[in-house]
Image (cartoon, coloured by chain):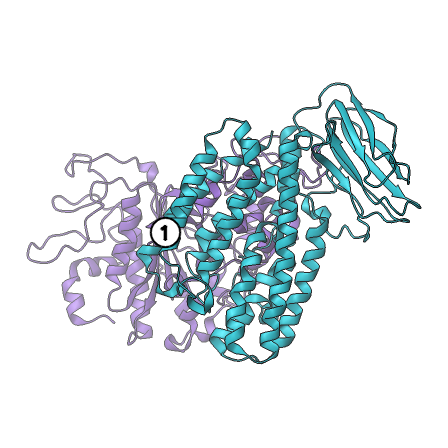
Amino acid sequence: MSTDGKRWGRRGAVAAAAAGLALVISGCSSPGGSAGKAGEAGTARTAPDSGKTTTVTIHLTAQGCQPEPAKVPAGPVQFNVTNTSAGGVSEAELRTADLAHILGEQENLTPGLSGGFSLTIQPGTYKISCPGASQPDWTLTVTGKATGPSWQSNPQLAAAVRGYAGYVKQNTAGLVGHTRAFCRAIDAGNMNQAKVAYPQARVYYERIEPVAEVWGSLDTSIDGRWENPVTVKSQFTGFHRLEQMLWQDSSLNGAPAMCSGLVKNERQLLTLVSSAQYNPLEMASGATDLINEAGTSKISGEEERYSNTDLPVFAANVEASMKVVTLLRPYLQGKDSAIVPLIQQRDAAVASLLADYKASPGYDDTGYVDYSTVQNSQRRQLSTAVNALAEALSKLSAQVSG
Amino acid sequence: MTTAEDTERAGPSRRRLLTGGGLFGAGALAGGLTGYFAQPDGAAGAVLGDGNQRIPFYGAHQAGIITPAQDRLAFGTLNVVSGAARADLRDLLREWTGAAALMTAGRLVGEQTEPMAPPVDTGEAVGSPVSRLTITIGYGPSLFDHRFGLAARKPSALADLPPLPNENLDPDYTGGDLCVQACSDDPLVAFHAVRNLARIGMGVVAHNWMELGFGRTSTTSTAQATPRNLLGFKDGTRNIKAEQAGLLEQHVWVGRETDQPWLRGGSYLVARKIRMFVENWDRDYLRDQENVIGRAKVSGAPLSGGTEFSTPDFAAAGADGEPAIPADAHIRLASPEHNDGTRILRRGYSFTDGIDPQAGTLLGGLFFIAFMKDPAQFIRLQRSLAGDALGEYIHHTGSGVFACPPGLRPGQSWGDALFA
């Protein structure tokens, strides 16, 4: 589904305001120099009134990465990292004192590049690490009083967020690759092969949708459906127009150009997600949003109205949502929460219902039956099960927002 | 088409009705089904209505537009049936005028005196207080096609709405030659009004679609408290109010700008059936809900601060430096400040159609009604809402636009000016 809106961005802002924290994530200029529209993703936010931002400068050298100053007050800290000539050192990491967890980092700084990262940091001792240097670990001391709970200094939450960033990036790369295969079938005029390749590419998008929706107009050009929100024929581009050509028009007239436009948009998305930053609240909300998606546009058959390949994308929504749960689980278990078992139980209920529609090789090789053969009463069972799952998932946001 | 048989069947009431306001105020007739109100002698054995609960039917403008919004709505659209002629439509509008004058005065559309004939009035509102019933009619664009010789009377501003963002219209809930909006604080009284007008019109008009509203979501008078919609938020805080005569002239009443003199003093009604995905909404965390709307949920105050009626400060920044009222907040995108001063008078109701048979989720939301000087005002606002954060949770599924003629003086009928 694609509706305009920058929900993710607003949620980021909300997180900062709700917790009264200086939630400053990112703001980094990556080596490619492109932070893209990452600002829209709630990333390049300035510190609220809870404290002044302290700047720590780190020069990467062959000898190491000494932070200057090496002692800072608790609160928002901006790390500026530069590499003028250190060929064998290309990153700086902020780690817990035992080196077990990375809390923030700037990678891929080859000589001549600079970058940075920022976060709110709590009192304690930390390490700045720069693998490859003769002294790779340097101490950073943070003094003063705690500025409030911050996920960034919680290793489990920080790891979950890093894991999610990787998941989104990986699936966006998969999206580009599988869409290229889809386009090759179209270019070859092989309609049957294109029909098989279409859902294979779609599932990647459906896993990253809450993130992709941040860039509203890009999302619309990739995934916009006719009438929702696209009402101008010339703006109906991307997956669903190609779906219409394949299944309804049975014509590939104009399809190759449209498909290469789709790939171009996806590559832009890949650039954007590569520099986007996330937080646990956004992850949790996004998990609920994914199930909301499954429960509305997939159950109704609106999403894949020409191809009836709704079941694999439905499964992709659920899968990506549960990926978030898996990532947050180490943290949630520490909170003695009953919510994870409930989510797992309800996910199992969805999976059990979905199993009834699995087929091999299935409709268009999707592994599932044609969704148009799923009766209303069966759709209602699926809907009821995903609604129960979403309801449980919606309890996560308060647990991870500190 | 009025047949001889129809006339005979409904004879007593119709003759009476065709005398215009003749019986209006003549007092209760004894016996039988005589009125909504319990009679002073308690004959109908029900609650005694308060005279103040009657809204005058006659006036410069139709009642039911700036009338303080009643609690309940019955809204019907009807199509003229094939075979009906111009004269049939004209006669029907006269009959409707008489029936509406009676019902809004707390009377039945006809007293039952003949035991061997079907009751003239359907009877379900007997004993119910009239509860500020108003009946408002409007003409849809399709009424001005070739069928009734009205093409030259079509206001240039009256046309089907263009495709708009976030809609997927169900043809079963779209359009209509005519609309009837009945509002009352009593749901049965409102329903009774639409039902009886449709019954009177049988053979000339037929139901197209209908919706019941169970709770008002707008305030049209400063004397009313702001109600809440199904999202749990106060709705209509910044609505135009009946007391704001200048704003009404500027934004609501059709004036000299129209190319059709018969419509001056009238207004355009835009109806939109808006489904809310309430289950999804209910799962969103409170702070985000407030950011979607741009107001605090409990107090209704804008996120820029103050109290419910504080003017939103769209330039204000929050603690994090971002706009206090987010860039995609509903109240920002719908505001006059964001739309070159465009405003409309909203008069919507919450509705439910039960359960979605496919998804098992609630089928309900906002039955949006708004009055304006020109439908272009609604189009402008709806296009602005293309990036509305609320768009994720709502979907427009029904639509209609109607030209509501001005009010009547006693002795005048709906259609007189249109057909003159």
Q: Position of residue A384 (x, y in %)?
A: 37, 47
Element at badge 1? helix
Q: Residue at x 46, y 55 (%)?
A: A314
* Chain letter tied to cyan: A
Instruction: Name chain B's colour.
Output: purple
Please state which amino acid type lies under the numbered disc 1.
Answer: Leu
The residue identified by callout 1 is A353
Which residue is situated farthest in the left direction here? B116
User: From the viewer's perspective, is B114 left or right of B255?
Assistant: left
Q: Is residue B394 visible?
A: yes
Q: Residue furthest right?
A: A85
Q: Residue at x 23, y 53 (%)?
A: B109
Looking at the image, which is closer to me, A255 or A173? A173
Q: Chain of mark 1?
A: A
Q: Position of residue A168 (x, y in %)?
A: 63, 50
Task: Indicate the position of residue B310 as horizontal and vertical percent values.
Answer: 61, 34
